[in-house]
């Protein structure tokens, strides 16, 4: 069974620009009972899943969170994302994906990104956002409206500000109350790699982000997890690449570039070593 899209505006490859905000997706979806939207990778955008009816689950990085009418779920760049509808109470939701070049807004979102890593901490409610997304959908559908672009920009700006206010990073509570400090640091390293897989070009950058010497981080990670940092990074990149290939929306060369491989040859060799087949031969 497939989802039923009431409205589906996708601008994945060519986002609509409203001043310093890029609109990637905006729409409304009514699910059939029990349907699952296949796991997919978010690129460089944030996304809201605004539940307007029914119930279901949102899964991020393998962690499933129940949602129902009134809930809003915030997804981050590089999330591995999946949505499932309840069989007896089919899910209905609006969705809004965006990125921004506004330094103030982007900086505030980045703080949320760092503070709310766990999937369970991403659910909130705000009726103003629900209304603004609904209004933005109507504006997008009618290109004849006067001052349409300015109106849409105003709505998108307000939505982002309400998101930032909902996630007050000054009051963010760490989920690691009874955990060893070294375990916490390794968890933070893995979370940073997972959520910055498209922007992390070299592992030594972790030293600046974590404020520790890289040699110390590397030795600690190996001792605590039994894996090397480079192995974790490589595996995460290739897992992400495989999901993108399965989606079929990007060329192999585009995926290699997106994941910061020096060439398509280097990417193909690493992929074949990991999965036993070339990227172009993946089904």
Image (cartoon, rainbow, N blue to C red):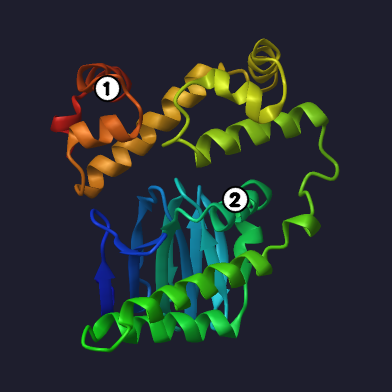
**63 with respect to 171 (left or right):** left
Q: Which residue is mark 1?
A: 267
Q: Which residue is mark 2?
A: 107
* Position of the N terminus by quadrant: bottom left
- The image shows residue 29 at horizontal and vertical percentages of 34, 78
**Tag 2 secondary structure:** helix
For disc 2, the neighbor class at 10 Å (few under 14, some 14 to 19, many from 20) is: few
- The image shows residue 278 at horizontal and vertical percentages of 18, 25
For disc 1, the neighbor class at 10 Å (few under 14, some 14 to 19, many from 20) is: many
Q: Earlier in the sequence, mark 1 or mark 2?
A: 2
Q: Quadrant of residue 263?
A: top left
Q: Is residue 47 above or below residue 103?
A: below
Identify the residue at image location x=66%, y=35%: 188
**62 with respect to 87 (left or right):** right
**Nearer to us: label 1 or label 2:** 2
Identify the residue at image location x=31%, y=42%: 243
Q: Is residue 181 visible?
A: yes
């Amino acid at each position: 069974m497939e989802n039923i899209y009431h409205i589906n505006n996708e601008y994945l490859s060519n986002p609509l620009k409203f001043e310093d905000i890029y609109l990637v997706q905006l729409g409304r979806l009514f699910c059939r009972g029990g349907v699952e939207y296949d796991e997919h990778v978010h690129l460089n955008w944030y996304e809201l899943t605004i539940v307007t009816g029914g119930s279901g689950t949102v899964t991020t990085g393998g962690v499933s969170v129940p949602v129902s009418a009134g809930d809003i779920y915030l997804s981050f760049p590089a999330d591995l994302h999946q949505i499932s509808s309840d069989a007896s109470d089919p899910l209905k939701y609006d969705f809004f994906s965006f990125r921004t070049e506004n330094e103030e807004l982007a900086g505030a979102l980045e703080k949320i990104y760092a503070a709310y890593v766990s999937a369970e901490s991403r659910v909130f409610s705000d009726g103003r956002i629900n209304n603004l997304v609904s209004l933005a959908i109507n504006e997008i559908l009618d290109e004849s409206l006067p001052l349409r672009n300015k109106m849409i920009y105003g709505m998108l700006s307000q939505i982002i500000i309400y998101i930032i206010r909902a996630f007050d990073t000054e009051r963010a509570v760490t989920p690691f109350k009874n955990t060893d400090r070294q375990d916490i640091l390794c968890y933070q390293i893995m979370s940073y790699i997972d959520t910055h897989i498209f922007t992390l070009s070299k592992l030594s950058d972790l030293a600046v982000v974590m404020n520790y010497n890289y040699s110390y981080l590397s030795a600690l990670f190996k001792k605590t997890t039994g894996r090397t940092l480079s192995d974790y990074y490589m595996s995460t990149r290739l897992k992400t690449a495989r999901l993108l290939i399965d989606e079929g929306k990007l060329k192999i060369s585009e995926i290699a570039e997106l994941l910061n491989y020096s060439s398509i040859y280097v990417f193909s060799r690493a992929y074949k070593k990991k999965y036993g087949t070339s990227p172009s031969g993946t089904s």
